[in-house]
Image: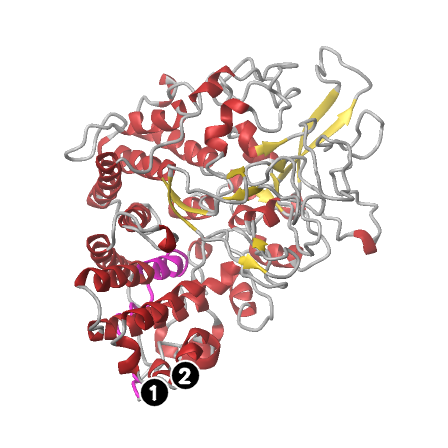
């Protein structure tokens, strides 16, 4: 039997959404080989499994190629963290599909449009990846020219990939059908959907196998493959999702205990092996970010460098930061980028044309004013609880992470690309600036239609987290961006949330001596923030809200918050539906009322407000799937 015929045995629904040739491009490398030849040789078998990585998406991934250089609907716009500045493409249209709760149109579009958002594409891509993984696992024991350890390392990768793909799909769509073996060509497609709980059990079974089989680390030529720690991190994320109100409808405390154990296992594993240490930027407590503070308008304060280097860093040659467990491998781009390592996706999503010179599809997602309010003051209080906070001077004395994540008016920000739109050397986001002109970083509504490719800001805040200061393009660029998938900061917050729900703020996971409160304080202290204020830890319910706020701040713009809002079942609340922009206007000079000379107003954009109903908590699957396999059943409500 030729390998290409063997591969084409269908997975469920494959015939309804993609041809064999479309979803197994990797197989073309094996044309003319018998399956015995492929799976009896360790190198060929590894190359075959590597095809499964080709469909791996994260919440912030962007596919390669001219038409896929940025995701049209990233998680940060769906979670209420930001809004895109792109106005002359399909971004507003797709955003409105989401904002109006029209997920079915999004899913159906993904199967008909030449360009579809990764939010949709994950569904078809995941099935493709699962198909390759299952083919490998069904034949892995044929490999006869390698050690048991080498074969087990490959199997461990396969189990990790299968669990990862299913988590991508099930956290959105709920229970599907967990394929551990591919269907034969003549096998019936009349399958029924399984419950989320059933899929969760299968994911955990795969992850336990992966944890047992994967190595602690890889040699340099294999960097980018999942490790034992990566499998443990995915298990922590999956168990936390399964314990949360969306999936754990009866609030079974055992689910929270399981999530606490999964996170504590990884923390103890990291401590034992000297891995995944939290970046220490505790010196940031000394930042001078008060009124006219020396550090207030610095692009990259030195004290924050250890923390900032988790996300961006100097030099094209990257090293994985100690805190990062698993990251996307940057692809090499051969067109505009002249064979350089591609900093996309996060750069494309969060910057405008001034820094994406030569790229036709920057999004320039700006942070929303109502989301920025989640950053506490430097004293460790929510802005509504700190009497020293002045909404007419909103940038001063905030959590040090504010100065890593958010770009605001006046920050020194140089662009080294030839012919940038903004030549001022600082961020100018005022509706009316000191020259009584429209800020040059804002998208002027009077811009002629033929110049709307000049993507600029709409929200009044830009995102700093993924954009390096002093950007340069090929021949000039000397920085890298880390497309992190799992990092230790998330794991400590997973632990804190699960332990708090199971045992309270001062509880610990079984066999571990770290309390939920201590775990959160570790995340805060390492960036110079004080411990959680006592007013927020009086009960499990009060601390729950502080943990959720801490996740919003620590993990902002990393593609995590949208699923957090869903799993907590709070996405329908007013605070998560509204969209507010910050509007700055020069008042002619400083005064008691306007200490900076500007007025600051949060203005709700009622036309952008989202609609989120009960059915939106679980996504539908494409209509074409139901037409092809009616027994599978559409998601409830759709």
Residue farthest toward the left in the current orientation of the protein: 511
How many numbered marks appear? 2
- Residue 184 position, x and y percent, is 30, 83
Q: Is residue 227 left or right of residue 381?
A: left
Q: What residue is drawn where x is 50% and y is 58%?
A: 119
Asked if residue 183 shows in the view, the reply is no
Q: Is residue 131 left or right of residue 141?
A: right
Residue, disc 1: 2
- Secondary structure at numbered mark 1: loop
Look at the numbered disc 2 and give the secondary structure of its residue: loop
Question: Split into 4 quadrants, where in the image is the N terminus?
Answer: bottom left
> Can you identify the residue that label 2 sits on?
31
Q: Could you tell me residue 33's position as x and y percent? A: 35, 84
Answer whether labels 2 and 1 touch (C-beta < 8 Å).
yes
Horizontal and vertical percent for residue 238? Answer: 31, 50
Mark 2 nearby-residue class (10 Å; few <14, some 14–19, many ≥20): few
- The CA span between labels 2 and 1 is 8 Å
């Amino acid at each position: 039997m030729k390998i290409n015929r063997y591969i084409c045995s269908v997975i469920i629904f494959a015939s309804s959404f993609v041809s064999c040739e479309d979803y197994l491009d990797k197989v073309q490398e094996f044309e003319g080989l018998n399956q015995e030849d492929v799976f009896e040789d360790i190198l060929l078998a590894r190359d075959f499994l590597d095809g499964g990585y080709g469909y791996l998406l994260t919440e912030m991934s962007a596919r390669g190629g001219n038409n896929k250089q940025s995701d049209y609907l990233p998680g940060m716009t769906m979670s209420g963290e930001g809004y895109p500045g792109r106005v002359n493409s399909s971004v507003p249209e797709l955003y409105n599909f989401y904002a109006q709760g029209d997920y079915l149109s999004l899913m159906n579009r993904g199967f008909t449009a030449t360009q579809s958002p990764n939010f949709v594409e994950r569904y078809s891509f995941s099935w493709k990846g699962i198909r390759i993984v299952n083919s490998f696992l069904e034949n892995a024991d044929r490999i006869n020219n390698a050690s048991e350890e080498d074969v087990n390392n490959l199997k461990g990768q396969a189990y990790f990939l299968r669990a990862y793909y299913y988590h991508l799909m099930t956290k959105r769509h709920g229970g599907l059908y967990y394929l551990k073996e591919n269907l034969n060509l003549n096998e019936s497609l009349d399958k029924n959907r399984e419950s989320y709980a059933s899929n969760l059990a299968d994911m955990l079974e795969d992850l336990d196998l992966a944890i047992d089989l994967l190595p602690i680390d890889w040699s340099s030529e294999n960097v980018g493959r999942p490790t034992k720690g990566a499998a443990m991190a995915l298990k922590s994320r999956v168990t936390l999702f399964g314990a949360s109100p969306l999936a754990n409808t009866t609030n079974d405390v055992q689910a929270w205990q399981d999530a606490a154990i999964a996170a504590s296992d990884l923390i103890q594993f990291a401590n034992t092996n000297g891995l995944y240490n939290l970046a220490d930027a505790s010196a940031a407590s000394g930042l001078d970010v008060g009124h006219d503070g020396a550090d207030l308008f610095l692009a990259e304060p030195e004290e924050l460098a250890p923390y900032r280097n988790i996300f961006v860093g100097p030099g094209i040659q990257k090293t994985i930061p100690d805190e990062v467990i698993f990251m996307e491998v940057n692809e090499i781009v051969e067109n505009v980028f002249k064979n350089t390592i591609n900093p996309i996706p996060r750069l494309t999503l969060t910057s405008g044309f001034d820094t994406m010179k030569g790229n036709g599809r920057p999004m320039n997602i700006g942070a929303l004013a109502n989301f920025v309010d989640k950053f506490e003051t430097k004293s460790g209080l929510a802005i509504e609880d700190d009497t020293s906070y002045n909404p007419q001077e909103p940038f001063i004395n905030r959590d040090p992470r504010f100065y890593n994540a958010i770009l605001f008016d006046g920050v020194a920000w140089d662009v080294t690309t030839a012919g940038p739109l903004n030549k001022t050397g600082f961020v100018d986001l005022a509706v009316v600036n000191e020259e009584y002109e429209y800020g040059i970083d804002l998208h002027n509504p009077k811009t002629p239609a033929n110049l709307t490719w000049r993507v600029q800001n709409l929200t009044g805040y830009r995102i700093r987290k993924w954009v390096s200061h002093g950007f340069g393009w090929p021949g000039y660029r000397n920085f890298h961006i880390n497309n992190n998938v799992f990092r230790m900061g998330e794991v400590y917050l997973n632990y804190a949330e699960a332990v708090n729900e199971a045992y309270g703020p001062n509880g610990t996971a079984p066999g571990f001596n770290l309390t939920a409160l201590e775990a959160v304080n570790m995340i805060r202290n390492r960036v110079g923030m004080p411990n959680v204020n006592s007013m927020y830890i009086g009960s499990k319910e009060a601390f729950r809200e502080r943990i959720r706020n801490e996740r919003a701040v620590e993990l902002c713009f990393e593609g995590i918050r949208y699923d957090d809002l869903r799993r907590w079942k709070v996405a329908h609340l007013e605070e998560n539906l509204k969209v507010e922009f910050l509007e700055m206007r020069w008042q002619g000079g400083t005064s008691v009322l306007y200490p900076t000379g500007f007025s600051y107003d949060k203005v709700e954009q009622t036309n952008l407000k989202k609609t989120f109903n009960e059915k939106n908590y679980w996504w539908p699957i494409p209509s074409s799937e139901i037409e092809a396999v009616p027994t599978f059943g559409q998601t409830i409500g759709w």
